[in-house]
Amino acid sequence: MRLIWTAAWSFMLSAMIVYVIGSMAGDAFSISGTIALAITFTLVTVILSETILKDESSQ
């Protein structure tokens, strides 16, 4: 369930970022850019949470 929420939030935040940056540049909204950014955010978050940022009390 944790991974689903991570992917959902990554997609929503990526859509917001792509929309705002595109609007500032005068470009149209790009769903492919949103999906690429969401995948990147999701992978980085999962890698960080599973490897580097382990909770000290759970070890």
Image (cartoon, rainbow, N blue to C red):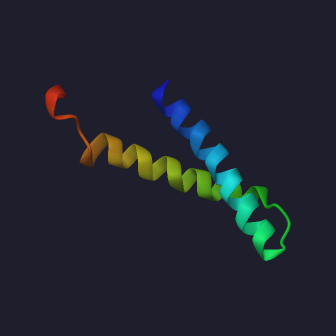
- Left of 25 or right of it: where is 17? left
Residue beneath the point at 66% across and 58% down: 17
- Left of 14 or right of it: where is 49? left
Q: Is residue 34 above or below residue 1?
A: below
Is residue 5 visible to us here?
yes
Residue beneath the point at 34% across and 42% down: 49
Residue beneath the point at 58% across and 40% down: 9
Is residue 33 visible to us here?
no
Q: Is residue 26 above or below residue 33?
A: below
Total count of labels: 0
Q: Residue 54, image x and y in percent?
A: 23, 39
Q: Residue 14, image x and y in percent?
A: 64, 53
- Left of 59 or right of it: where is 37? right
Residue beneath the point at 26% across and 44% down: 53
Q: Residue 29 appears in which quarter of the rendering?
A: bottom right
Image quarter hosting the C terminus: top left
Q: Nearer the viewer, residue 1 or 14?
A: 14
Which residue is the extreme one toward the top? 1
Q: Nearer the viewer, residue 10 or 24?
A: 24
Q: Residue 45, image x and y in percent?
A: 43, 47
Q: Residue 57, image x and y in percent?
A: 15, 28
Q: Is residue 1 above or below residue 19?
A: above
Q: Is residue 33 above or below residue 43?
A: below
Q: Residue 10 appears in which quarter of the rendering?
A: top right
- Left of 22 or right of it: where is 39? left
